[in-house]
Amino acid sequence: MAAASFETAAEELRAVYSSGKTRTYEWRVSQLKAMLKIALHHEKEILEALRSDLNKPEHEAFLHEVAAVVSACKVALKQLQRWMKPEKVKTSMTTFPSSAEIVPEPYGVVLVISTWNYPFLLSLEPVIGAISAGNAVVLKPSEVAPATSSAMSKLLAQYMDVSAVKVVEGGVPETSALLEQRWDKIFYTGNSKVGRVVLAAAAKHLTPVILELGGKCPVIVDSNINLTVAVRRIISGKWGCNSGQTCVSPDYIITTKDYAPQFIDALSSELEKFYGKEPVHSNDLSKVINSRHFERLTKLLDEEKVSSKIVIGGQQDKTNLKIAPTVILDAPGDSLIMNEEIFGPLLSIITVDKIEDGISLINSKEKPLAAYIFTNDKKLKEEFVKRVSAGGICVNEVTLHLAEHGLPFGGIGESGTGSYHGKFSFDAFSHKKPVLYRGFTGDVSARYPPYSPGKLKFLKAVLSGDIIGIIRALLGW
Amino acid sequence: MEGSESEFGGSLFGLRRAFRSGKTRGIEWRTGQLRALLKLVAENEARIFEALKQDLGKHPVEAYRDEIGVVKKSADHSLLHIKEWMAPKTGKLPLLLFPSRAQVLPEPLGTVLIFGSWNFPISLTLDPLIGAISAGNTALIKPSELAPACSSLLSQTIPLYMDTEAIKVIEGGSDVAEKLLQHQWDKIFFTGSPRIGRIIMAAAAKHLTPVTLELGGKCPVILDSFSASDFKVVVKRIVAGKWGACAGQACIGIDYLLVQQKLAPLLIESLKACIKRFYGDDLKNLQSICRIVNKSHFDRICKLLEEPSVAASIVYGGSLDRENLVIEPTILLDPPLDAPIMTEEIFGPLLPIITLDKIEDSIDFINGRPKPLTIYAFTKNEKLKNRILQETSSGGVTFNDTMIQFICDALPFGGVGQSGFGSYHGKYSFDTFSHDKAVLHRTFFLELEPRHPPWNDFKLEFIRLAYNLDYVGLLLLLLGLRRRYTRTGSL
């Protein structure tokens, strides 16, 4: 599509939005139901597309993508009426007599730019939020997962109201052309480099932006825990989540020098139970998305100071773009693997003398999207929750906070800005419009000129909520 | 502090160190600083009045109402509620995740930068600061150089009352602002024009810094018909909303007014009478009204009146006193809609009245223009009220009054579209400077094995039922009493 046609597309959406149809409850529900149908009736097609793009195991694809979209639709359908209701608020004496409410209104025409690692979920969950809030939407799926992109383009056109929900397929030129248009909100999922480009483009039109980025998510592993359960949860959150190509996957582990050998043994034996002796051939592991990322990952391992530190795995299959679950012990602080987001099946372990040192280690780096800790030490838990700044935190668990609609999901600092999921998705695409209602009684002359010292006295009393002072000022004392 | 590049680096480093020390996170520090701010305002009331007089010719009553009082009320409100704001909110979790506990914990963003504005140089600088402190951040504030007396007063007094390690003031103009923007902040809060807003946002993009932009726009009044007694109150509120706050140099001030043609003559006569009563009609001796902030803004406003077709539409006022920077309250009737006065934000004491056939036409009129910060509507017609709410978009809507939404702590204050984004006041100020951290607590007890590979059909079925929160089905499955999922089955 040429730049001019993007302009036309945006204008068409604006006209549809102005007609008011996307604002109605009925339209929103009809679109959410259509979305639900896509996920329910075309599961096979979607799972196949995900197999083709990422070799994603069906179970993973179902659990993380299809079922998550179904669940997001259902939550929205169930709660929408409540979300749309204006929120009554109490007003104070200062504005007496008055009443007030906060009315959520759609932003208008919004742009969702998605990513390739969960190409179905991370495209449609923001769209669910945008629709719930009554916006017209353009979705730009990632061209790096072409099968899913084209499946979504086809299915959305088939089921949804194409006059208000459009899919634009394409790569960098299409994205750049889209970003030149004026949008009322932009929702971007991806990396912080492109995040900066999106923000700078949005600045021209003063468009608010939500950035869902990533970062190096740390896991502190204390020694007083149920090691098997911890290790299984870590494996599930790392390799069981798209081979670590997940924004909330553990990036590095922090544990004590003394405990590291035991932890590595457990990790090694559980990994074998999950993925067999030759994990590069396991069908339960996703592949690396493409050869560019494959090379990026092998480069992290090829550094001499890193390759000598591999304690588990390391096998690679370049033709099938597979890397076995690989664990590196104590990579030096200046190595690439300790400075870039790994976003793949490599896990680094850093040892410290005292487990408490882990907190300062995490805080010395950029704020991650998620931070995890496994411990039964109450004090350490509290310290961790209080002192570690991250988008989200799990204690004795990894990645699971994502599945909880009651929790906002989003980053801070380098890991992004803004949040979504459940009601938070609705809020992400709504402007909360404050509305104040006044009557004509109780008009206070102190507000109006000509000003006098008596009026000053009165105002002082009103603004401090001092009833006696008000009476005194009124009586002229 | 007038700063060079290295000094900025130094004070930023100091602010970051203070934040890292953790002292600003405790409730004692926050309430201590809020109390210090209250003390600052109380003990320096006379100096603040004087500075506002110098910078803007602001009368003490207006100064108290729009500046000192606002700061005092905000700080009091924060002190009253800070404990409940800081408390983590617990979320309900599905049984499936049992045993676990979820909470949302507000945490400070870190070191924040606040740009004040010149029209309310005290309140629009200190009100955001109250939010930053309440949320436990360290902050650098840059007051506007266009209100120099207030800027210098803030930079002198703040270090005397507040924690100088955690709260700093830097004075200066755009060169200073530019240098500040090169550094990384955890949040930037800006009040001002859309043009500068774009620059701020572009600079923030380099560091992925979240921004709150409090901009302005052309805030319209929709005026329906009223009984004579109500109409008196309406007129007073319109005059107060146009000229009462900094002579129209206010982001939520009335910009223009929409009214039915047949009501215009009465409206104009009533406005004139009210203006005379409030401010007098002697240009050299106007009372209780601010002057224009400086020569360049004075010239900008005069230019809006220059075009002959616009000048011809003046029905009241129009006198100018460049030496004293005073512009008489001025009313225009139906100036051309393509003239700058109707396409740019006026931000001064001029009020264009636009007449319409039907008051309902005002909705299309407003929708044909960028989203304003506020829409004021004077009407008792519930249907019209509802249409305004549903069919227009603006930062906020106020029915049957002007300006007072600003002091309503229960409502978020902020724009949408060209009028900015992000909001503050009351709890919203706290939220603006906080990150809501999602926290999930789990134990090692009860591990759901179907979460983990190697995958098989049993596990897939388990996951299906779990997502449906079908606990009976799950139980049957676990007992081996449920038929496994087949591809033809539905959820």
Image (tube, rainbow, N blue to C red):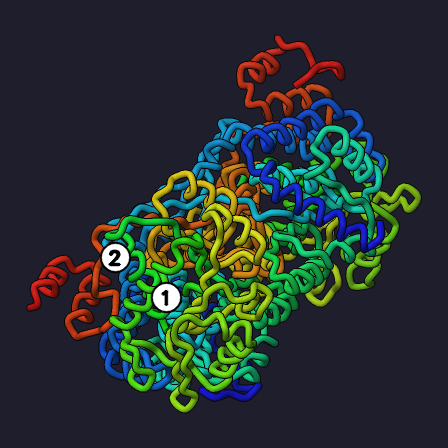
Residue drawn where x is 56% and y is 15% of the image: B475
Tell me which corner region of the image, top left, top right, bottom left or bottom right, holds residue B461: top right
Quadrant of the rendering where the C terminus of chain A is positioned: bottom left
User: Which residue type carries mark 1?
Assistant: Ile
- Most foreground residue, B284 or B62: B284
User: Dot 2, crowdedness within 10 Å: few (<14), some or many (≥20)?
Assistant: some
In the image, residue B385 lies at what x, y percent? 41, 43
Residue B158 disc label: none
User: Which residue type carries mark 2?
Assistant: Thr
The residue wearing badge 2 is A94
Residue drawn where x is 57% and y is 49% of the image: A410
In the image, residue A62 lies at what x, y percent? 71, 29
SS for callout 1 = helix
In the image, residue B284 lies at what x, y percent? 32, 86
Tell me if residue B36 can be seen: no
Cα separation between marks 1 and 2:
19 Å
User: Dot 1, crowdedness within 10 Å: few (<14), some or many (≥20)?
Assistant: many
Residue B130 disc label: 1
In the image, residue A374 lies at what x, y percent? 54, 45
Residue A42 vs A447, above or below: the answer is above
Tell me the chain of label 1. B
Q: Is B20 on the left-hand or right-hand side of A95? A: right
Question: Which residue is most to the bottom?
Answer: B323
Residue drawn where x is 54% and y is 53% of the image: B365
Tell me the chain of label 2. A
Residue drawn where x is 76% and y is 33% of the image: A157
Tell me which corner region of the image, top left, top right, bottom left or bottom right, holds residue B92: top left
